[in-house]
Amino acid sequence: MIQRIQTVYLFVAFIVAGVLTNLFSFFLLSDNVSFYLVDTFVSSSVLLKSVGVFFVLSAILSLVAIFNYKKRQNQFVVGRVNILINFYLLSVLMYVSLKLPGEMHISEKGVGIYFPIVIIVLLVMANKAIKKDEDLVKSVDRLR
């Protein structure tokens, strides 16, 4: 059933990864230019290009997990993979933001840098709800 609570968590994770990353900046560079997700695709750094690709992949995996509601085990695995992707995103964004100031010219961190944390929390809550549903189905099957 698509109206379960994990669907809400996964949809909010999709909104954060797919929509809010395009609206909020990741960094404010030293020349007062904001650095958005779209800028990662035209960046010269391979790390920043991977950030853009992995945010898009995270949004797609959230949608795949939503529409994979009939197979709870697959939904759980997709959620775990999405969590790993967001840990990678978090580590890359923290590495880039903590780099020496002379190398990257980042003067201020934006809100977008913390989006992987929000997505990870939402995915963990979704996986807990998926696990709870799976346990409930198994307990009902034992009673039959």
Image (tube, rainbow, N blue to C red):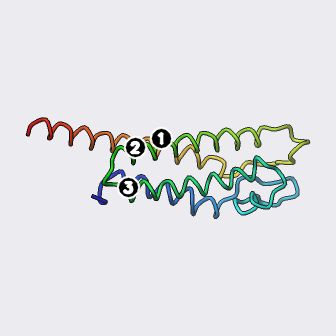
Task: Indicate left or right for 109 with 77 as reference.
Answer: right
Mark 3–mark 1 Cα distance, whole angstroms, equals 14 Å
The residue lying toward the viewer, choosing from 57 and 12, is: 57
User: Are circles 1 and 2 on residues that touch, CB within 8 Å?
Assistant: yes
Few, some or many C-alpha atoms within 10 Å of disc 2 (few <14, some 14-19, many ≥20)? Answer: many
Amino acid on which the number 1 mark rests in the picture: Arg
Question: Looking at the image, which is closer to me, 136 or 24?
Answer: 136
> Which residue is located at x 48 percent, y 42 percent?
121
* Extreme residue in the right direction: 102
Where residue 11 sits, quadrant-wise, is bottom left
Q: Say which of 36 and 59 sits in front.
A: 59
Contact check, label 3 and label 2, Cβ < 8 Å: no
Q: Which mark is residue 80?
A: 1
- Mark 3 or 2 closer to N-term? 3
C-alpha distance separating marks 1 and 2: 6 Å
Residue 77, quarter of the rendered image: top left
Residue 135 position in % (x across, y down): 25, 37
At horizontal 36% and vertical 40% (from top left) the residue drawn is 128
Earlier in the chain: of badge 3 and badge 1, it is 3
Query: Which residue is at a point 79% across and 49% down the rendered structure image?
Result: 46
Specify the amino acid type for callout 3: Asn
**Whole-percent x, y for residue 43 in the image:** 81, 57
For numbered disc 3, what is the local secondary structure?
Answer: loop
The residue that mark 2 highlights is 76
Q: Which mark is residue 68?
A: 3
Circle 1: element type = helix
Closer to the camera in the image, 140 or 124: 140
